[in-house]
Every structure is written in C-alpha cells, then in structure tokens.
Amino acid sequence: MNFDLSEEQQLLQDSIQRFVQDNYDLEARQAVVASADDYNKDHWATMAELGWLGLTIPEADGGFGGNQVDTMVIMEQFGQGLVLEPYLASIVLGAKAVVAGGNESLRTELLPKVIDGSVQLALAYAEEQARFDLHDMVTRAQADGEEFVLNGHKSMVQHGGTADYLVVSARTSGGQTDTNGISLFLVDVTSEGVDVTSFPTVDGLAAAEIKLDNVRVPAAHMLGAQDTGYEILLAVAVDGILAVSAEAVGAMEMLYKDTVAYTQEREQFDHPLSDFQVLQHRMVDMFMEYEQAKSLLYRATLEVVQNGTGALRTVHALKHFIGKTGVTIGENAVQLHGGMGVTEELRIGHYFKRLLVIDAQFGNSDYHLQQFAA
C-alpha cells in the first residue's frame, strides 16, 4: 500500500513543523505552562488563520471536509512539539460531536465560530465511577416541558476550564451501564448550576471537574436523537483515540532521536555512549517499537476512514500498543539520559509524562487489551 501523504497533507505537515520549531522550544512551552492561561491565545489565533481549526469540519459547515488522516498529520506534529492548545478538546472531540449530532441549527450557529477560534468546545463524558466505560453513567437528564434538567458530575474534562460550551453525556433512560438511554446535550458554561473547577495536569495541560446542579438545557440543544447518544459518543472516542495515538507517535519519535543524539555526545571511559553495543541494542529496540506503533497507527486510521466504528478491534489494538510502547520508549530514554532524564530543564521527562497521560486517556493499555480479546 502507498502510505505517502498527498501534496496538500505534505504542505500541512511542513507548515505545522515550522510552527512547532518557531514557537515550541522547551523554554517557551514552560512559560505558557507557568502562566495563568492554559494555552497561548496568539497560537490559537494563528491556528485559526491557517485553517487548521476547520480542516476536518465538513465543507457544508464552512470547513475543509478533511478526515482522520488529516487529524493524524496534525496531531503527530503536535506531539513532537508538546503543543498545549486545545485542538484535541475543541476540534477532534467537541466539533466532531456537534457534527455527528446532526442538529442543523446548532451546527449553523456554532461551527463557524469554532473554525475562527472565537468559541471553544469540550467533551464532558467521563465519570469517576466509570473507569474507562463510556456507557457507565449516573449523570441524568430529566425532561421538563421544552427543556431538560441535568444533574451529575463529570471528571477530567480536558480544557473544560476554557471552553465556552460543553458537550455533556447524560442518561435520559435505562440503568447505569446500559448503552441505550444515553443522550448528548450542548451546555453553555455560563448556565445557572454549572460549576467548573479547572486544574493543571501532570503533563502541562489542563482539565476540569464539572458539577451540574439542576442545569436547564433547551431540548433544541440535544445532539442526535434522544436515548441514542452512545453511538455518537463511541465515534467521537474512536477519533480521540486515533488523535492521541498520533500525538504519542510524534512524542516517541522525539524521545528516540534525542536519546540517540545524547549518546553520541556523552562520553564514558573516553568513548561516546553510542559506542557501547548494549546501548546500541536498546536504541534499536526503541526505534523498532516506534516504527511498529506508527505502522499500526496508519492501519487503524485508514480502517476507521473506511469503516468507522466497524474498525473498533484494530483501534483497541492500537491503543493497547501505544500505551505499552510509550512506557517502554519513555523509560529507556530516561534511563539512557541518567538523572538528567527526569529534570524539568530537559524535555525528555516532559515527553514521558505526556505519554503516561495519553495511556490513561480513553482507556489504558490493559483496558484495551481486554476489549480486544473480548
């Protein structure tokens, strides 16, 4: 098969590489992490101007009609730079849910603002009792005339603190673990009863705990048909898995390349570390693991483009392998750098922390191995 990027995708990749090189050295990234903001607003505006925010949104909604392959190109480069902007939260997850929901009035109202960067979205789906099951849900939505009243608690909402609207999953019927009976709602964060507690995560990004206390949402703000939101949620989660896996592949590439460069410079017993055969073997293992992860990412992404959630088994395999490989490459990179590998002044530890968080997003390696086997 031909895995070469199209001319447009190659131009996109080159553009993002330049953006990362110009704006995302470690010092600049650390300055943003230490600031009061969760991301750099100028960078977000630049992404909007370059058209990246509308790349995967349908042309009918003002976007460019791209697919998961285009997201993969973007996220792999973002992984190399450890980019902080909420592209995953707002575009891959939030905008995808609005598009898949098929609510024409909401699409017309919201998506142009998402594309120009003036509105941000976040997906509030995870609950503390659910572990990694999308359908384990106790947040409820009760119909009341032309509105629904939402009550519940959503955990680890990525970039929930800077979002203007939340896509909230809630149970409109059925038991706690039923796949039927789940509905999706678009909730304005300024609505009465919405309590957002934002906090930094270990990888330098941000998340939020969302409490919903008798939050009234118009019935017209439902995404998709009532009780059928699980299928939309699953499709959004699959796109999220592909996106963070691409980001992880980008981070792995930087880890093994930085490690090779360091061992060529660092001398021990009057020889560069790269001269020692046992270390050469470990770096070859790192490279092979990275290449396998990249190949599986390509396969899973192309299968999802062709078959959607019909490719779920390959997606489970990908997420398991990404989690396992990220830990292997990260540990080797840290060990070969010695004590420097865990310092804040070296970017090795920052890549490793991001890989550990990616493993936990949308289900960790063990969870997806169980789902693959099932």
Image (cartoon, rainbow, N blue to C red):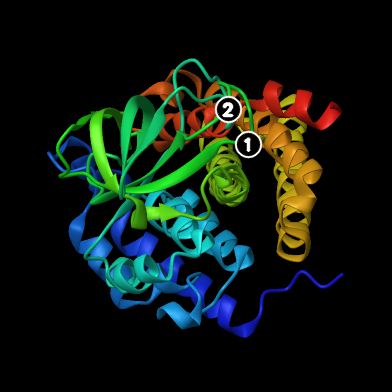
Q: Nearer the viewer, residue 142 or 205?
A: 142
Where is residue 262 drawn, in percent x and y?
Answer: 52, 38
Residue topped by disc 1:
180
Does residue 79 show up? yes
Picture residue at 45% right of the left edge, 28% below the top: 353
Mark 2–mark 1 CB contact (< 8 Å): yes
In the image: residue 125, left or right of residue 179: left
Picture residue at 52% right of the left edge, 70% below the top: 13
Picture residue at 58% right of the left edge, 22% below the top: 175
Where is residue 334 drawn, in percent x and y?
Answer: 53, 25
> Which quadrant holds the C terminus?
top right
Mark 1, other Cα within 10 Å: few <14 / some 14–19 / many ≥20: some
> Which quadrant holds the N terminus?
bottom right
Where is residue 116 drawn, in percent x and y?
Answer: 28, 72
Where is residue 363 drawn, in percent x and y?
Answer: 60, 29
Q: Amino acid at mark 2?
A: Gly
Q: Nearer the viewer, residue 319 or 336?
A: 319
Q: Nearer the viewer, residue 202 or 232?
A: 232
Residue 182's place in the image compared with 357, above or below, is below
In the image: residue 340, left or right of residue 352: left
Picture residue at 46% right of the left edge, 22% below the top: 138
| Kind of element beneath mark 1 | loop
Mark 2, other Cα within 10 Å: few <14 / some 14–19 / many ≥20: few
Mark closest to the chain's N terminus, 2 or 1 = 2
Q: Amino acid at mark 1?
A: Asn
Residue topped by disc 2:
174
Q: Dividing the picture into quarters, in which one does residue 152 lie?
A: top left
In the image: residue 21, left or right of residue 187: right
| Kind of element beneath mark 2 | loop
